[in-house]
Image (tube, grey):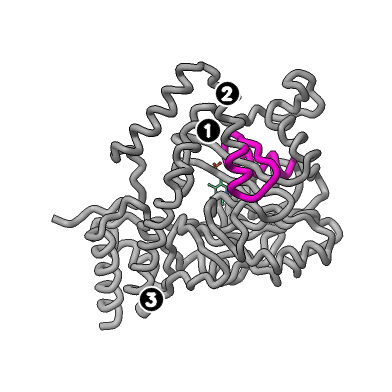
Amino acid sequence: MTMKVPFLDLRLSETAERELLMQAMETVLQHGRLVMGPEITQFEETIADYCGRKFCVSVGSGTDALFLSLKALRLGPGDEVITTALSWVATANAIALTGATPVFADIQDDLNICPHSAESLVTKRSKVILAVDYTGKICDMEALEAICRRHNLLLVEDGSQSFGATHKGRRCGAFGTISAISHNPMKVFAALGEAGSILCDDEALYERLVALRYNGTINRETCIEPSLNGRMDTLQAAVLLKRLDLLDALLQRRNDNARYYSERLGSLLKVPAEDESGQPVYYTYTVQTPERDQLEQYLADAGIETKVQHRLLMPEAPAYKPGVRGSYPNALVLSQQILSIPVHEKLTEAQRCHVANSIAAFVAKQKR
Ligand SMILES: *Cc1c(COP(=O)(O)O)cnc(C)c1O
């Protein structure tokens, strides 16, 4: 019988964690403030502090976080936002929904936006660089900050995949004018459903975000600008507060799995390079090989679930392809070579060994 290795396991099977989260939810059910309860404020203060920011605004999803962030910066038709070609399509959608035009830059071999490519796409219409910390590794923020200073642009961080990661002594959530984070169940710091956060340091921007999160109202009553209802449920804030206490241990297990893979596989195919500027969180552990499709099939046959994130670049999606602006030759090549293997915190020693053995067997077979 072949061993099954799931890409993720979202069941709450560990009793200690289950107990903790049930208690947190029980408290919310007791006080009954299901929307904007006390856990919301507590969550926002805790997360702002954790990320080293003045303000956090909790929202309904990572997509809400991105869209409301860009809307708060008053982007609209005629404005351009430079972003990476390789991300979950929520990144481009948030730009497009403000009326602004996404412009797609190339990626480096670490799968993050290439600063040179981003700078080459700057025009008079450029307003923002939206940097995605892909795979859980923070971008080359110093280079991006310098470009923003040179061209009078704002930097926005999409930290949806990188909550908990560090870069030169700063944490994910601390970069740029605003950071947007997803806490959906697939993410490393995950709620038990949809949830997101926005982080910033500017008080006026914070107040604007609070209004935009609730139908563009001040005092939750008077509408000053049309917007959506994007508030986080109190239950999710309560769950996330408990999970923050467990985050370090979770990250350690992921890092340990990543280290194990890099040692076993580093000489066999391209694995994530060691990050000298900080510690990534390994939202995904993504290998690169020209035989990607064959490896994907080989691992599936061995009972190992993998993911390609993403097969289609955002600018290649039917919604964006017609008349798309940008230049991303390396992203076109790498999107055919990337494969994410299971690296989650519930992986057993036997499972990760099976994954590494199977990849080694595949590489040996290709060589014959
Ligand atoms: C998950 C993700 C989002 C969207 O977050 P949701 O909470 O699913 O709406 C946005 N950007 C990136 C890079 C993501 O990985």
The residue labelled by disc 3 is 266
CA–CA distance in space, label 3 to label 1: 39 Å
Q: Is residue 6 above or below residue 61?
A: below
Earlier sequence position, callout 2 versus callout 3: 2
Name the residue tied to disc 1: 237
Residue denoted by label 2: 37
Label 3 or label 1, whichever lies nearer to me, is 1
Q: Report the span colored magenta.
A: 45-71
- Label 2, label 3: how many angstroms apart (C-alpha)? 48 Å
What amino acid does circle 2 point to? Gly
Rendered residue at 45%/43% (across/down): 245
Left or right of 233 on screen, residue 115: right
User: Which numbered disc, 2 or 1, marks the residue that appears first in the sequence?
Assistant: 2
Q: Residues within 10 Å of mark 1 (few under 14, many from 20)?
A: many
The answer to the question of whether label 2 and label 1 lie on touching residues, with beta carbons closer than 8 A, is yes
Element at label 3: loop
Inspect the image, locate mark 1, and give the three-letter code of the amino acid beneath it.
Ala
* Among the two numbered marks 3 and 1 on one chain, the one whose residue lies closer to the N terminus: 1
| Furthest-bottom residue in this view | 368
Instruction: Name the amino acid type tagged 3.
Output: Gly
Find residue 121 and report its horizontal and vertical position in percent: 75, 65
